Amino acid sequence: VKVTNSTVNPKVAGIYSITFEVTDSAGAKATKTCKVIVEGYQKPTNTPPVLEVLSVYRLKEGQSFGADKQKNLITKATDAEDTPNSPLGLVDKVKIISEVMPKVPGTYWVTFELTDSAGATVSKRCEVIVEGYKPIPPMSE
C-alpha cells in the first residue's frame, strides 16, 4: 500500500483527502480515496519550569562562595516537558546572578533564572548573609 496523493495538514482544521494505491502479485492495481477530517488543532501548552532555591544562606566572612557553592543553593530545577523525571535535571541551565562579596559582611541577594526549551522563564532569589567575625572580648580580671 502506498499513498499516491494527500492534502492532509494535521495543524489546520478542515476536510482533506488521501488516496491509497495497492498492487497485487499479478500487477493489478486498485485505488481508494478517503476523506480525512482534522478537527481544531491545539498547540500543546508549555508548562513553565520549576525552580526552587534555599531562602536564606549564611556564610562566614572570607569563606569561599564560588559557582559550585551557589549551585548548591538550588534544590529543584526541572521542567515537565524537558526533564520530567529528574528533579535537578536542569541545574546546569540555571543562570546565576550574584553580587555577593564574601569578604565584606552584609546581606546580599543571589538571583537564579531558568528558561525551558519553549522559552518559559522562572526566577527565584536567595538571601545570602555574610557574617563578620566577632572579636572575642578580653577576659577581665
Image: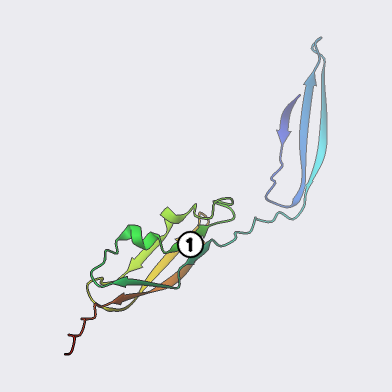
Residue toward you, 2 or 50: 50
Q: Is residue 117 above or below residue 59?
A: above
Q: Residue furthest top?
A: 26
Residue toward you, 79 or 136: 136
**Residue 66 picture location, percent across and down:** 29, 61
User: How many residues crowd around disc 1 within 10 Å: few (fewer than 14), some, or many (20 or more)?
Assistant: few
> Where is residue 26, by image quadrant?
top right
**Residue 18 picture location, percent across and down:** 76, 36
Residue type beneath disc 1: Thr
Residue located 21% across and 81% down the image: 136
Q: Is residue 36 above or below residue 48?
A: above
> Where is residue 100, by image quadrant?
bottom left
**Residue 96 picture location, percent across and down:** 37, 64
Q: Please say which color scheme the image uses.
A: rainbow
Secondary structure category for the residue under label 1 = strand
Residue located 43% across and 65% down the image: 113
Residue, disc 1: 75
Relative side of 67 to 34, left or right: left
Residue toward you, 41 or 134: 134
Residue toward you, 66 or 130: 130
